[in-house]
Amino acid sequence: GNDGGASGHAPRRPGHRPLRLTDEADMRKAMIVWGGWAGHDPDICAAMIRGWLVREGFDVTVETSTEAFGAPSIRDFDLVVPIYTMSKIEKAHALNLCEAVKAGVGLAGHHGGMCDAFRDSVDYQFLCGGQWVAHPGNIIDYRIDITRPDDPVTAGIAGFAHRSEQYYMHVDPANEVLATTTFTGDHAAWIDGVVMPVVWKKRYGAGRVFYSSLGHRAYELDVPEIRTMMIRGMLWAAR
């Protein structure tokens, strides 16, 4: 942009553009809804993700009740981020979220906060593209392999080792898989060699859906590869 040329402006940092009144209306809007099981640090994750989105220029609303998914105003957001492991959702609220995404609202999330939320809601699972069912061995060492290095979400990221829960999931074959992990038979002999999606994106009507199964605890979101894929994935999903 230009420097305005008007007098009376305070000096500003190089490259810094002051917020003008029109900018606020143009800002993309995101809603984070956190709650559910405390073992996944939903409050800390919400604060971290809010910070990332604010830095990317989003106006971020934070809610703590699943009723937020049922509000008509959900259609005004460009991105919804659920962080709500287990718990329950009213069917009407789940359907309202599904309809909002179908109409173009983006959905993005991670680990159990998105894909182990609302276990009794098949509508929600159809939206997300997967549901957690097991993490054999609990906290173990495993690898994440990038299957689509050409995708903007994963560009420049190499496969990496990680120590956490290795999510075994029931997944939608329509997902566009960006990263996978391969199970050994050490903790469940019959799954030896199973290649499991870890990061994916998909369409749901006019909406975009992004998911990463990584991030059992909040500090894991600061692993550079995990953080980068999450930020890029949210930006891709946002309308």
Image (cartoon, rainbow, N blue to C red):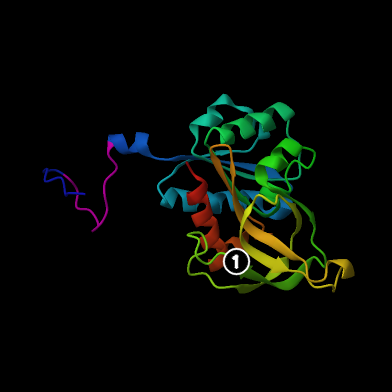
Which residue position holds label 1?
Answer: 147
Asked whether the viewer can see residue 215, the reply is no
Is residue 221 shown above or below 74? below
Please give left or right for residue 83 compared with residue 154 in the image: right
- Frontmost residue, 21 versus 102: 102
Disc 1 crowd rating (10 Å Cα; few below 14, some 14-19, many 20+) is some
Over which residues does the magenta segment extend?
A: 9-20
User: What amino acid type should be assigned to the residue bearing mark 1?
Assistant: Thr
Residue 10: within the magenta?
A: yes
Q: Look at the magenta stretch and give its main secondary structure.
A: loop
- Frontmost residue, 78 versus 62: 78
Please give left or right for residue 204 compared with residue 86 in the image: left
Is residue 22 shown above or below 173? above
* Among the 4 quarters of the image, the one containing residue 177: bottom right
* Among the 4 quarters of the image, the one containing residue 8: top left
Q: Position of residue 88 (x, y in %)?
A: 76, 37
Q: Position of residue 92 (x, y in %)?
A: 70, 26
Residue 199: within the magenta?
A: no
Please give left or right for residue 233 compared with residue 214 in the image: left
- Frontmost residue, 12 versus 54: 54
Is residue 26 shown above or below 158? above
